[in-house]
Image (cartoon, rainbow, N blue to C red):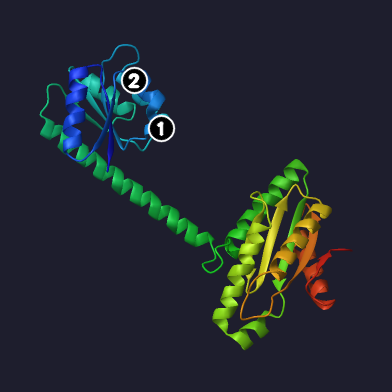
Amino acid sequence: MNRIMVVDDDEQLRKLLEKRFKACGFEAISFESAVLALEAFGSVLPDLVIMDVNMPGKDGIEACRELTREYPDTPVIFLTAAGSVDDKLKGFEVGGQDYIAKPFHFEELLARIHAALRIKRARDEAVQKADNYKTLSITDPLTKLSNRRYFDIRFAEELEKSSRHGQLLACLMIDIDKFKSINDTYGHEAGDEVLKKVSSAIKSGTRTSDFAARYGGEEFVVVMTQTDLTGAIQTAERIRTAISNLDVSPLPCVTASIGVATGVTAEILTNADTALYEAKRSGRNKVIKYEK
């Protein structure tokens, strides 16, 4: 149900519009002043606003200017007894979507409301589709972590920030142990489930400021900002333990090896990968820090 906010100092008109809107299937709420409407807007969050231009105190033009700064996607239809071209231009300049002069036929106002809501709905759907496409383009579809392509972009950004502020970056390279054997023995569906559960363990073991991605196959990477080697190792151990405790039935268990490196250059990726190789070589299911 669409919610309409009516802002007008004419009490009789407000009550009439509320009654008519509710009869048409809308939820309606009204305010006698722009100040009260703006104060309540964040809690009401209407789909559309009907606002008189000429009101005591803050007028509709100024109220619309403030409103559209914070809620630019909410359509505003102005009501006014003065329908001059200048008034209309002012209304459009501050973000108003439509204008109707008093007195008006309710049916005309209703038609304009439906038109404004259709435009809003189409715009909202377009924004949602764009967001969905963006998410798909940067997300690994199986694990829901960031994909390699987006990781490369974010990693470059974090390196630049780290260099500018003189702050350490930490990198964890994580590889599921004997993953090929899992696929060969239990099938690719079981392997996919392992990948998803390991990804969840990685997400749960990192901070919101950390950046995790599927690096390729059964390999994952985590970049941590403002983190020294001790903190990175603690996080890596937390992730390793969480992975080893996963319920991966029908598999008896799953483990991962993790390489850790810190620094301020792109070398931390290579260094973490070197440490990962050492973790695999020395028995797997362990965390190894990079040492020159």
Residue at the extreme top: 56
Corner quadrant of residue 197: bottom right
In the rendered view, does 159 fall on the left or right side of 81?
right
* Pointer 2 or 1: first along the chain: 2
Q: Which mark is residue 43?
A: 1
In the rendered view, does 175 fall on the left or right side of 58?
right
Q: Is residue 287 visible?
A: yes
Tell which of 141 and 240 is nearer to you: 240
Question: How dense is the environment of label 2, judged by Cα within 10 Å: few (below 14), some, or many (20 and up)?
Answer: many
- x and y, in percent, of residue 187 in the image: 57, 85
Corner quadrant of residue 62: top left
Q: Which mark is residue 146?
A: none
Q: Amino acid at mark 2?
A: Ala
Q: Residue at x 33, y 30 (%)?
A: 95
Q: Amino acid at mark 1?
A: Ser
Which residue in the structure is indicated by mark 2? 34
**Residue 112, placed above or below residue 282:** above
Q: Is residue 83 visible?
A: no
Tell which of 203 and 173 is nearer to you: 203
Secondary structure under tag 1 reads helix
Q: Residue at x 79, y 75 (%)?
A: 284
- x and y, in percent, of residue 154 in the image: 62, 54
How far is disc 2 from disc 1 in space, using C-alphas?
A: 15 Å
- x and y, in percent, of residue 82 in the image: 18, 17
Quadrant (top left, top right, bottom left, bottom right) of the C terminus: bottom right
Judged by depth in the image, the label closer to the viewer, 2 or 1, is 1
- x and y, in percent, of residue 22 in the image: 20, 35
